[in-house]
Amino acid sequence: MTFDTLSSDQIQALLDEQTAAYETLKASGLKLDLTRGKPSPAQLDLSNELLSMPGADFADAAGTDTRNYGGLTGLTELREIFAPIMQVPVEQVVAGDNASLAMMHDNLVFALFHGVADSEQPWGVEEAVKFICPVPGYDRHFALLEEYGIEMLPVDLLDDGPDVAAVRELVKDPAVKGMWLVPTYSNPTGAVVSEAVAAELAALETAAPDFRIFWDNAYAVHHLTEQHTKTADILGLCSASGHPNRPVIFASTSKVTFAGSGVCFLGSSADNIEWYLKHLAKRTIGPDKVNQLRHARFLKSVDGVHALMDGHREILAPKFQAVVDILNARLGEHGVASWTEPKGGYFVSLDVVDGTASRVIQLAREAGVAMTPAGAAFPYGDDPRDRNIRIAPSYPSPEELAAAIDVLATCVLIAACEQALAQ
Ligand code: PMP
């Protein structure tokens, strides 16, 4: 992407104009943060009923006192609500504490120390363990792998899922033990893994007999339009292809109720759940059942979850629209950037001129707008084209968001002009 039709004098004029606008913005003392996909206070308010629950009636449907120890799999009535969302039988769903990221962490660590259900030995004693990482992707997935010395192999995330041809090549290496996937409204591009791609991944012949797909469905019900995209049934597809233990499915209510005090879920084959619970039993006596009980009573049913998500959509959709509108208005005519228009999830992914993302983020920071660091959506923080920027529109107020995206657009133009003039 470049200024195809502009002369260098015209680019210089644009740079002067944008620099003047930038200096004015900088002087206005902005302090805006678009770094993380946090729900806004208005979104959190939708679940305030939880704060006074469960009250004096703290027994679950089976009559268990939720205040006490035990119940490793989590409360049945809450698992019943999330089992259909995860497309896993309720007996194969575990409800945990507040962070699915912690479940992902534990799955990796248990695998490294013990191997998974069909491993010959612990992953940790293998010479190398590698994971396929669709990019751009979720920085914390990559941070987890880096933390434990698991080598990351990037593949392109396309509109309908990862580049399957590239994945097919990589899984010929027996050291490749798994891959990340955010199947619905991925972080950050909003891509949705199609049924066809999911079926191909389910059927892949992998050199490692204990290959796992970490299917992180963090945004399963987080629609931004009337269209309710249905996630592919990865467990059914893998079972039908003779690989029932391949998928490990994660979800949580972090962006449904309270991001810091929600409930997370793991779904998988019966063998994998047995394996997980065996190791989990050493780590904890049981989850926070009081929190699970109040969630079950507050959400009530799958319809209850969707109704709550409609409330989130009302708050979020106009913010996403504003981001896209401002980017269009400010950048559309120049052809120096492209961006996603997601139908769900929490992010807009912006690609700027190759080699300028770091500069854009630096300029934005100096003008008081904090963005996720350049390269964050890539393993080892390395965006080979230095072009991807993740925008998280959820937390700021509409006014703050508009101001921040305006600054960002100015920075994109300045960096693009600088680059074009330097060539
Ligand atoms: N997975 C993805 C893809 C996410 O974007 C996030 C939150 N940004 C998480 C997991 C974190 O989930 P949790 O709060 O359940 O740990």
Image: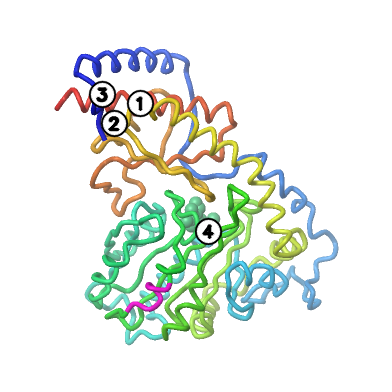
Residue labelled 4 has its Cβ within 8 Å of some atom of ligand 1: yes
Residue at image position (25%, 70%) is 170
Q: Residues within 10 Å of mark 1 (few under 14, many from 20)?
A: many
- Across and down, in percent, residue 18 comes to 34, 17
Residue 303 x, y percent position in the rendering: 72, 61
Amino acid type, mark 1: Cys
Label 1, label 3: how far apart the Cα atoms are: 10 Å
| Distance Cα–Cα, label 2 vs label 3 | 12 Å
Q: Nearer the viewer, mark 1 or mark 3?
A: 3
Q: Earlier in the sequence, mark 2 or mark 1?
A: 2
Residue 359 got which mark? 2
Q: CA distance from mark 2 to mark 1?
A: 8 Å
Residue kind at label 4, given as amino acid type: Ala
Badge 2 vs badge 1, beta-carbon distance below 8 Å: yes
On the rendered image, what quadrant is the C terminus found in? top left
Percent of width and height locating residue 117:
43, 84
- Residue 254 visible in image: no
Badge 3 is on which residue?
417
- Sequence-wise, the earlier of marks 2 and 4 is 4
Q: Position of residue 7 (x, y in %)?
A: 20, 19
> Mark 2 vs mark 3: which is more N-terminal?
2
Residue located beneath label 4 in the image: 218
Q: Earlier in the sequence, mark 1 or mark 4?
A: 4
Q: Is residue 381 visible?
A: yes
Whether tag 1 and tag 4 are in contact, CB under 8 A, the answer is: no
Segment colored magenta: 199-204
Q: Which mark is residue 411?
A: 1
Which of the two discs, 2 and 3, sits closer to the camera?
3
Report the mark closest to the observer, 2 or 1: 1
The secondary structure that most of the magenta stretch takes on is: helix
Mark nearer the N terminus (1 vs 3): 1
